[in-house]
Image (cartoon, rainbow, N blue to C red):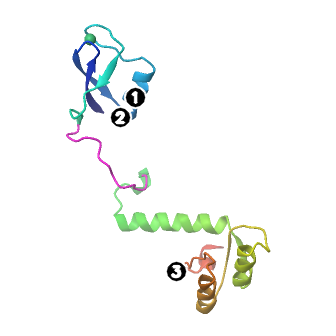
Amino acid sequence: MIVFDLLCADGHRFEGWFGSAGEFTRQRDRKLLSCPTCSSPKVSRVPSATRANLGATEPKKPSQPVKTPEMEGKDPFAIAQMLYSRMLDELLTKSEDVGKEFPAEARKIFYEESPARAIRGQATGEEHQELLDEGIPVARLPVPPTDKLN
Ligand SMILES: [Zn+2]
């Protein structure tokens, strides 16, 4: 919850509680807000007096992965592992396995000789570097994909 100090057109000052900063704007635009003293719908926020009942204004947090119940009590490293493994699963189920044809296929897609799609497969370190040198966006997985397949 956030508490805003509000001011009506007649200069009455009062407090409004909102779920978020956007909630104030939404309620005001829908004319759901009115001054408790004179019922004027012309309500504006008093700048600089914003505060939250948790003791801080809305913090600008860096974006964080959403926590789910299964993450409760786990250390950040375990959570990172889990998210990584999920990302890997996603990648593997949504990409086409082209095996050792990977470097050739990645090139064909890049030069639009093959339909654009997500592919996975094997490439040697040298092949990988060649692809990068050509400006083809490929990523290396530290875990061999075959481990996750069966
Ligand atoms: Zn008023």
Residue 104 on image: x %, y %? 74, 83
Q: Quadrant of residue 102?
A: bottom right
Residue denoted by label 1: 25
Q: Hey, which quadrant is residue 46 in on the image?
A: top left
Which residue is located at x 40 percent, y 66 percent?
Answer: 78
Residue annotated with mark 2 = 21
Residue 65 seen by the camera: yes
Given the image, on which type of amino acid does mark 2 rest? Ala
Are the residues at dot 2 and dot 1 in contact (C-beta closer than 8 Å)? Answer: yes
Horizontal side, residue 109 vs residue 80: left or right: right
Identity of the residue drawn at 26% across and 20% down? 7
> At numbered mark 1, what does the secondary structure look like: helix, strand or loop?
helix
From this view, report whether residue 115 is shown above or below residue 104.
Answer: above
**Label 3, label 1: how far apart the Cα atoms are:** 47 Å
In primary-sequence order, the first of circles 2 and 3 is 2
Residue 119 drawn at (x, y percent): 69, 72
Residue 82: say if magenta. no
Q: Magenta region: which residues? A: 54-66
Left or right: residue 149 compared with residue 43: right
Pointer 3 local density, CA inside 10 Å: few below 14, some 14–19, many at least 20: few
For the residues labelled 2 and 1, the Cα–Cα distance comes to 7 Å
Q: Position of residue 53 (x, y in %)?
A: 23, 34
Q: Which residue is mark 3?
A: 142
Residue at the spot 23% in from the left edge and 15% down from the top edge: 11
Q: Quadrant of residue 31?
A: top left
Q: Is mark 1 within 8 Å of ligand 1?
A: no
Proximity of marks 2 and 3: CB atoms separated by less than 8 Å: no
Number of other residues with Cα within 10 Å of mark 1, as a class: few under 14, some 14 to 19, many 20 or more? some
- Of circles 2 and 3, the one toward us is 2
Drawn side of residue 133 relative to residue 33, left or right: right
